[in-house]
Image: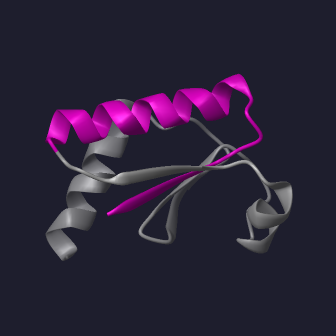
Amino acid sequence: MKIEVFGTGCPKCNMLEVNATKALRNLGVQAEVVKVTDIEQIVDRGLMSTPALAIDGEVVVAGRVASVGELTELISSRRERA
């Protein structure tokens, strides 16, 4: 599983990364967490607002900081599909 956190390094972007890491730890899931800060890469993915988060290439959150609980549910549901 690959988690991408998109943002320029603002406090909200950092909080989304922290929440994603906590959700992974709560689930006991090993995942690659990548922080994407390059604005060209963010725009190339079609994102118009940050922070944003993608799971295995699919953007699941954009323009807000998702809670640990919400991210836990999103990650869990993606694992069930695999």
Does the magenta-highlighted stretch encompass residue 8? yes
Q: How is the image coloured?
A: one colour
Q: Position of residue 72 (x, y in %)?
A: 27, 43
Placement of 51 over or under 2, stated as above or below? above
Residue range of the region highlighted in magenta in the rendering: 1-28
* 33 over 64 or under it: above or below: below
Q: Position of residue 55 (x, y in %)?
A: 42, 62
Question: Residue sitting at 14 percent across and 41 percent down?
Answer: 28
At x 78%, y 73%, the residue is 44
Quadrant of the image occupied by residue 69: top left
The quadrant of the picture occupied by the N terminus is bottom left
Which one is nearer the viewer's eye here, 67 or 32? Answer: 32
The spot of residue 47 in percent (x, y) is: 74, 62
Residue 63 picture location, percent across and down: 68, 46
Name the residue furthest right.
40
Q: Main secondary structure of the magenta part?
A: helix
Q: Is residue 11 left or right of residue 79?
A: right
